[in-house]
């Protein structure tokens, strides 16, 4: 009985994590598209990043129908957050921003990458579970 309750809590926590990361990525799309500089290169760059993030959101949430898509979305999201941490750190260092601000901005992206890595593992675990419980083909 207690194990069932713990498993329910774990399942709800992973659903909240998946939804929270998807909402965070959606907020990145929403807030960056409105603040694009009017140059064509910036618009192209922002559009491509927006399309990438939208694809990652779809893949993350598609986990419930296809765990392989969830694993791809989780891995892509992990790479996105790690890349974001590197780019933010580089741009902050070059602009002489305070060390504590740089740390907070980088650690946020690293923690989000760990969360996405957890979701990737959950999708891989679900793929293995489906593979193990799949009936053997009849000859």
Image (cartoon, rainbow, N blue to C red):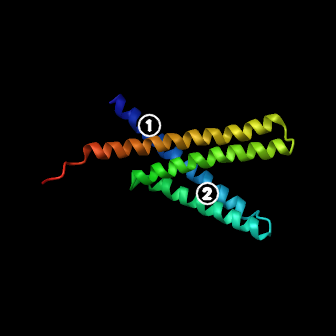
The mark lying in front, picked from 2 and 1, is 2
Crowding at label 1, few (<14), some or many (≥20) Cα neighbours within 10 Å?
A: few
> Which circle marks residue 9 in the picture?
1
**x and y, in percent, of residue 76 in the image:** 55, 50
**Which residue extends farthest left?**
139
Q: Nearer the viewer, residue 125 or 65?
A: 125
Real-space Cα separation, disc 2 to disc 1, in angstroms: 25 Å
Crowding at label 2, few (<14), some or many (≥20) Cα neighbours within 10 Å?
A: some
**x and y, in percent, of residue 62 in the image:** 45, 56
Residue drawn 45% across the image and 51% down it: 70
Residue drawn 40% across the image and 38% down it: 8
Residue drawn 63% across the image and 46% down it: 81
Q: Secondary structure at mark 1?
A: helix
Q: Is residue 77 above or below residue 32?
A: above
Q: Nearer the viewer, residue 110 or 139?
A: 139
> Which circle marks residue 110 in the picture?
none
Where residue 56 sits, quadrant-wise, is bottom right
**x and y, in percent, of residue 77 in the image:** 57, 49
Q: How many marks?
A: 2
**Which residue extends farthest right?**
96
| Quarter of the N terminus within the rendering | top left
Compared across the picture, whether 129 is left or right of 85 comes to left
Tag 1 or tag 2, which sits nearer the N-term?
A: 1
**Which residue extends farthest top?**
2
Where residue 25 sits, quadrant-wise, is bottom right
Q: Nearer the viewer, residue 107 or 82?
A: 82
**x and y, in percent, of residue 13 in the image:** 49, 40
Name the residue carrying label 2: 26
Q: Secondary structure at mark 2?
A: helix
| Quarter of the C terminus within the rendering | bottom left
């Amino acid at each position: 009985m207690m194990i069932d309750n713990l498993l329910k809590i774990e399942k709800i926590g992973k659903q909240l994590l998946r939804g929270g990361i998807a909402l965070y990525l959606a907020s990145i799309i929403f807030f960056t598209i409105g603040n694009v500089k009017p140059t064509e290169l910036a618009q192209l760059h922002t559009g491509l990043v927006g399309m990438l993030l939208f694809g990652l959101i779809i893949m993350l949430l598609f986990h419930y129908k296809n765990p392989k898509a969830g694993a791809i979305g989780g891995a892509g999201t992990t790479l996105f957050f790690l890349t974001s941490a590197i780019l933010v750190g580089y741009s902050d260092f070059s602009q002489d921003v305070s060390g504590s601000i740089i740390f907070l901005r980088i650690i946020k992206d690293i923690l989000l990458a760990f969360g996405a890595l957890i979701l990737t593992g959950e999708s891989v675990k679900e793929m293995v579970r489906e593979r193990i419980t799949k009936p053997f083909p009849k000859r």
